[in-house]
Image: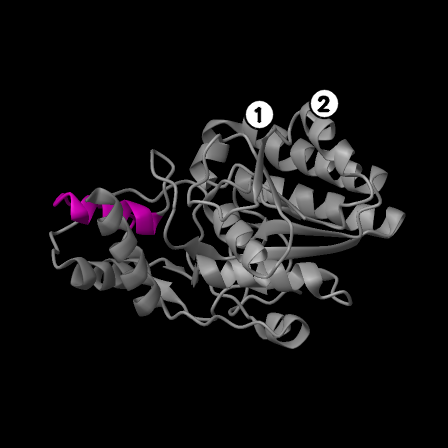
Amino acid sequence: MVVTGGAGFIGSHTVRLLASRGLGVVALDVAAEPRLPFPPGVRLVIADVAVWGSLWQHLRPLRGNLTGIIHLAAVVSIEEARQNPLRALRVNVEGTLNVLEAARRLDVETVVYASSAAVYGEPRYLPVDEAHPRSPANFYGDTKLMGEMLVERYAADYGIRTVSLRYFNVYGPGMRGGPYAGVIHAFIESLLRRKPPTIYGDGEQTRDFVYVEDVAEANYLALVASNTRGTINIGTGVETSINKLYKMICRIVGYCPEPRRAPPRPGDVRRSVASIEKARHVLGWSPRVSLPEGLRLTVEWYRSIRV
């Protein structure tokens, strides 16, 4: 199996899970080190999905031995995509096309595509199910929707079994930091440094936060469920405001300063929560880790790496 973006946040959890289930795994990434250590036997290949020659050079030798690809490599931040649309287009769209074309040429049976709740845009109803219209509110969502369309075309024209998993807000150990970090990382990092974090808007915007190990399990199930095709939401069905999230993390860390307030960010939707009935029905998947427990585990991990 190949996991693109395998050294990243969701990728490293997915690679570890696949290896624990006895699957041979090649992790393909532009990063030289995984976010979390790989178990023995996992091979890390340095390659860029947005560059066809680089990707094909490393996948072509796997001909005859490659049955599935989990495609996670992407620009994953709304703000990063807004600031650097050319890169977002190259990685999220051209990179997805390259992966699909490699799969076609190598007769790969299954491609699991990491899509996003961002394809829905501002919800017209809640919870959002897979039949909800796709109308992205930002460029990141546009690129993920274009990726979905490519996936659907390759499935229809070339018979590849494809599954697009629409992740909601994934969190857990190994999240990326820096200027495009997600809200949970930003809150934890600030509070552990005894600094007030920033909340954009009034904080009453809501999200559906799903723990990364549950997402890795969904990736595995989509890969091995031979009769499953199409799009599937991966969330929890629980709607949580940013203000409530902040208070939860404060209680775990044991420090709760008044947060700084800033204007809403462009492209942010007001409310978001998934319907996960399809995931339960067709994958036999449901989240195992509650938000309080997942936040506790995540804070513990961040504390451990600061020692």
Decide if residue 289 is in sight here.
Answer: yes
Give the distance between the C-alpha atoms of the residues marked 2 and 1, in whole angstroms: 19 Å
The residue lying toward the viewer, choosing from 263 and 150, is 150
Residue lying at 54% horizontally and 30% vertically, measured from the top left:
30
Percent position of residue 152, x then y: 77, 50
Report helix, strand or loop for mark 2: helix
Q: Against 150, is 128 above or below?
A: below
Does 198 appear in magenta?
A: yes
Within 10 Å of disc 2 (Cα), the crowding (few <14, some 14-19, many 20+) is few
Q: Is residue 194 left or right of residue 108?
A: left
In the rendered image, which residue does mark 2 sit on? 53
Within 10 Å of disc 1 (Cα), the crowding (few <14, some 14-19, many 20+) is few
In the rendered structure, are the residues bearing label 2 and label 1 in contact, judged by CB atoms less than 8 Å apart?
A: no
Q: Is residue 254 left or right of residue 17?
A: left
Does 119 appear in magenta?
A: no
Identify the amino acid type marked 1: Leu
Residue lying at 40% horizontally and 67% vertically, measured from the top left:
239
- The quadrant holding residue 143 is top right
Percent position of residue 183, x then y: 33, 49
Q: Is residue 263 left or right of residue 20?
A: left
Q: Which residues are magenta?
A: 183-201
The residue lying toward the viewer, choosing from 236 and 134, is 236
Percent position of residue 292, x then y: 30, 68
Residue lying at 54% horizontally and 40% vertically, measured from the top left:
140
Decide if residue 261 is in sight here.
Answer: no
Q: Nearer the viewer, mark 2 or mark 1?
A: 2
Most extreme residue toward the front is 40
Identify the amino acid type marked 2: Gly
Report helix, strand or loop for mark 1: helix
Q: Against 142, is 133 above or below?
A: below
User: What is the basis of the colouring in this image?
Assistant: one colour
In the rendered image, which residue does mark 1 sit on? 86
